[in-house]
Image (cartoon, rainbow, N blue to C red):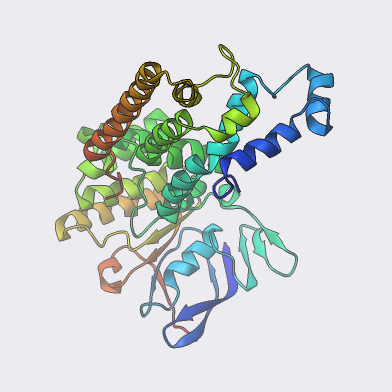
Amino acid sequence: MPLVLPPSVLGFYLLLAFSPQHGVGKWLHNAFDLQFVFSFQGLVLASVIYSMPFMIGPIKSALQQLPASLSQASYTLGKSERETFLRVLLPNIKPSLFTAMVLTFAHTLGEFGVVLMIGGNIPGITRVASIAVYDSVENMDYSSANTYSLILFCITFVLVIGVFIFNKTQAKSPLE
Amino acid sequence: MISINIEKKLKAYSGQQWLKVNREFTDGSIIKIYGPSGAGKTTLLKIIAGLVSPEKGIIKVDDVIWIDTSTKIDLSPQKRMAGFVFQNYALFPNMTVQEHLEYATKDAEWIDRLLSIGKLETLTTHKPEHLSGGQQQRLAILRALAIKPKLLLMDEPFSALDQQMKVVLIGELKLLFAELGLTVLIVTHNPQELDGLCNGELEIAGY
């Protein structure tokens, strides 16, 4: 669902779900003194929920491309599914894993709707760069907006170039 | 003693066909398995190893039931611990020759012996992508032997070896199989190449 829902809708439902006045949010608040609404922890949790599919998709696809005989060979050596996953499957999708991590991070960095909903744009606590750009433009402070935008642009540019170079040099499947 | 009585439905170009095998093999047998493509030779090995389930049947090894569809007993491949040499080798791209063997066994002496048998002592730090086809095949055989299985299943294990290496390796393996008291089932497309090694045969024909 996070893939197809508008981020603001997802953020709205997370806001309701984690509200300290209701259900899960109330229980978390009472039992563990945890508050996910308008807090940095909530921001992180919402970003994870929102961005998880962008991570899982490429990893799942990479795992499916590995020959079944790799895990079968490991099983016949007496290894459990867990050990096979950690020592045989995961190391052989390292390039896809790295690419998925970097692109998910870059995607999360620019997220707006979800973090605004659950974080509430509190300066110093939940105000993130993408929201700061919007705020600055609304206040006609184009200089700050430019600075924030440039920083985001540079980080994203470096990450994308990094992934591109990595894919060119190392991301070739070890099975080819 | 290995007793196999299984039936497995196979998909074929001509529709469905059945793999039916009902045989017993004494301990220490070295059996070549041959038959037309698609008859189910590889499937039979995978059924024995526990990687594929038959529709019906029972497999018993030394009075231990590995699978019995009527009583729903089905040991996992991890519990059967049958050595398996895959047709495509199924080597782990992330591991070196040494790491392959260390993944299978912690017995350093046994690893050294295997490396010597497979003539891979000088290639211990090489990963599969830096090995020739023949070296990869030898590594696949050594890895299967590393767990000291009672039953070894080999799916066309000598197809990528040149004639000279094949003769040398078959000679070494024959001694090793006898020493370990291994029962070996070898799938081959060329039954003659195993004449000096095997003491029994099983022809698989699709039904």
Q: Quadrant of the N terminus of chain B?
A: bottom right
Q: Quadrant of residue B115?
A: top left
> As rendered, which of A90 and A42 lies closer to the eye?
A42
> As rendered, which of B205 and A134 lies closer to the eye?
A134
Residue at the location (59% across, 65% down)? B53
> As rendered, which of A172 and B203 lies closer to the eye?
A172
Q: Is residue B26 visible?
A: no
Image position, residue B45 (x, y; %): 47, 64
Image position, residue A104 (x, y; %): 45, 35
Residue at the location (48% across, 52% down)? A72
Name above or below for residue B29 compared with residue A70. below
Q: Is residue B19 left or right of residue A46?
A: left
Q: Is residue A72 left or right of residue A147?
A: right
Q: Quadrant of residue A174?
A: top left
Q: Is residue A175 left or right of residue B59?
A: left
Name above or below for residue B96 compared with residue B177. above
Instruction: Please identify the residue farthest to the front as the structure is shown.
Output: A140
Image position, residue A148 (x, y; %): 39, 20
Image position, residue A55 (x, y; %): 48, 40
> As rendered, which of B99 and A100 lies closer to the eye?
A100
Q: Quadrant of residue A95?
A: top left
